[in-house]
């Protein structure tokens, strides 16, 4: 966190004017100190201290603030200066709040049945600070908590009232990159030029796909390529509903497409609803750009 | 109870449940303690533990160690790295000063991203009450 250009921060000067002024006058706890709230607290925090149960139980001292929380109800006793201070901060875009410091002193234990009242004062407002969460002001209040006329605890509380830092929008997920190696580099070069290249054995002239270093039929390592004409049919297919992978939006159809040349390849079947893809459906090759680096061959369903 | 005594560390699993239940048990309905979307809009990657829960855990750490006769006099904490779901908080303490039956214990709590809490607790332990 760091000081901003606090020198010409007019807002800070105005906020500072509220130091020493009340933030709560004659606030009252929503409920008397009570065993159920104590029990819930202990249950959540895993606190098994026997002092907090049974006859003569006291409340965990650290619950002090819990007894004066407004919850979802309007604050009781909130003083005008504090409302004004918060409104000034809200207007300046400091709409979010997070607590940073809490200092409590416990003068005597609270027991079920105690009815607490409280008064608070605005102790200080910091110069403008920039934190990971955003830029804003630390506001410190001090609260005196009483039962009847007796001071039972004090509670100093510091909050950061801040304008949330803008988080950069998550970049869209990208499809996985193909693994390009010496054996298949020619295929991907072809795709870049919008050509679907099949390998042809130099010896037996068999066509093959995917690309391999040698002929699986005759073993010959030499080959050349032919361009697929782009016509084919759905030999088989699946529709993926789940799980969703980044950059893919289920449901979508994946076809095993038999090309007119006789070899088969796997790719998306596009241009028809996923549930209209059928075995035997004619498809036509097209090249689809997915991002600034990735172009893939896909097959568009040809409907009658 | 002597100056320099270290308290055994206490590990707390910071579950989403603990964060939400702690916020509710302390009547803290700030959305950043239960609503991940709202937390993100406010610059936080996820919901995070509220200060009252941390305060309560620090109090529990001290009374767990010093026993049910120990009386907390003062708890002062400062929060740093937030407690997000899935993390583990490790509380540690060391006696910094002793005056008769009253001790000041320096407490720290670290999580996977840094120092979540640091502070001091003043506690009175009647003679014979300390372990």
Image (cartoon, coloured by chain):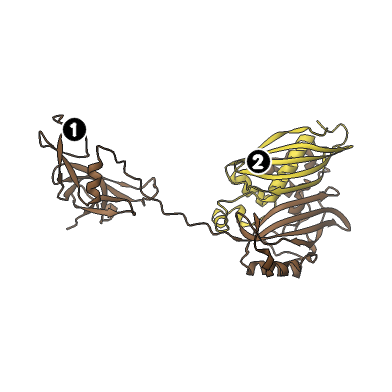
Chain colours: A brown, B yellow
Q: Label 2: how many residues lie within 10 Å, few (<14), some (14-19) or many (20+)?
A: many
Locate residue A191 relative to residue A96 in the image: left or right: left
Disc sitting over residue B110 in the figure = 2
Callout 1 secondary element: loop
Residue at horizontal 25%, vertical 40%? A184
Residue at horizontal 20%, vertical 50%? A195
Report x, y in % for residue A70. Answer: 71, 60
Q: Label 1: how many residues lie within 10 Å, few (<14), some (14-19) or many (20+)?
A: some
Indicate the quadrant containing the C terminus of chain A: top left, top right, bottom left or bottom right: bottom left
Judging depth in this view, the residue of A284 and A211 nearest the camera is: A211
Residue at horizontal 23%, vertical 44%? A187
For disc 1, the chain is A
Q: Is residue A49 visible?
A: no
Q: Nearer the viewer, mark 2 or mark 1?
A: 1
Residue A174, relative to residue A165: is it above or below? above
Residue occupied by mark 1: A214
Where residue B12 sits, quadrant-wise, is top right
């Amino acid at each position: 966190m760091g000081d901003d250009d606090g020198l010409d921060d007019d807002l800070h000067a105005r906020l500072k004017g509220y130091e020493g002024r009340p933030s709560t006058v004659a606030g009252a706890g929503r409920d008397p100190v009570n065993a159920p709230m104590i029990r819930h607290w202990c249950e959540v925090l895993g606190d098994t201290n026997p002092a907090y149960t049974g006859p003569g139980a006291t409340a965990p001292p650290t619950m002090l603030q819990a007894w004066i929380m407004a919850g979802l109800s309007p604050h009781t006793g909130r003083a005008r200066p504090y409302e004004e201070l918060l409104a000034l901060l809200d207007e300046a875009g400091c709409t979010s709040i997070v607590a940073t410091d809490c200092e409590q002193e416990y003068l005597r234990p609270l027991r079920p049945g105690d009815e607490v009242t409280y008064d608070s004062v605005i102790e200080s407002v910091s110069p403008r600070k920039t934190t990971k969460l955003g830029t804003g002001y630390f506001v410190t209040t001090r609260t005196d908590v009483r039962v009847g006329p007796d001071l039972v605890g004090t509670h100093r509380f510091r909050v950061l009232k801040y304008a949330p830092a803008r988080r950069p929008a998550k970049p869209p997920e990208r499809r996985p990159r193909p693994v390009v190696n010496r054996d298949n580099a020619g295929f991907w070069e072809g795709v870049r030029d919008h050509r679907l290249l099949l390998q042809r054995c130099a010896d037996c002239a068999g066509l093959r796909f995917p690309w391999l270093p040698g002929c699986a039929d005759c073993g010959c390592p030499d080959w050349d390529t032919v361009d697929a004409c782009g016509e084919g049919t759905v030999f088989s297919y699946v529709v993926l509903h789940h799980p969703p992978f980044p950059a893919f939006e289920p449901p979508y159809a994946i076809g095993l497409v038999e090309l007119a040349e006789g070899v088969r390849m796997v790719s998306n079947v596009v241009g028809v609803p996923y549930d209209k893809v059928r075995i035997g459906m004619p498809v036509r090759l097209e090249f689809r750009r997915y991002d600034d680096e990735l172009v893939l061959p896909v097959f568009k369903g040809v409907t009658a | 109870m002597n100056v320099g005594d270290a308290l055994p560390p206490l590990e707390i699993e910071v579950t989403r449940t603990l964060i939400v239940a702690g916020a509710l048990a302390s009547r803290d309905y700030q959305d950043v303690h239960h609503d991940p979307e709202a937390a993100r809009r406010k610059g936080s990657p996820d919901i995070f533990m509220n200060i009252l829960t941390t305060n309560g855990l620090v109090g529990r750490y001290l009374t767990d160690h010093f026993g049910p006769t120990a009386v907390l006099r003062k708890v002062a904490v400062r929060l740093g790295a937030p407690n997000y779901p899935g993390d583990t908080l490790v509380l540690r303490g060391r006696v910094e000063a002793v005056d008769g039956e009253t001790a000041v214990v320096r407490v720290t709590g670290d999580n996977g991203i840094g120092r979540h809490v640091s502070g001091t607790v003043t506690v009175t332990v009647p003679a014979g009450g300390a372990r």
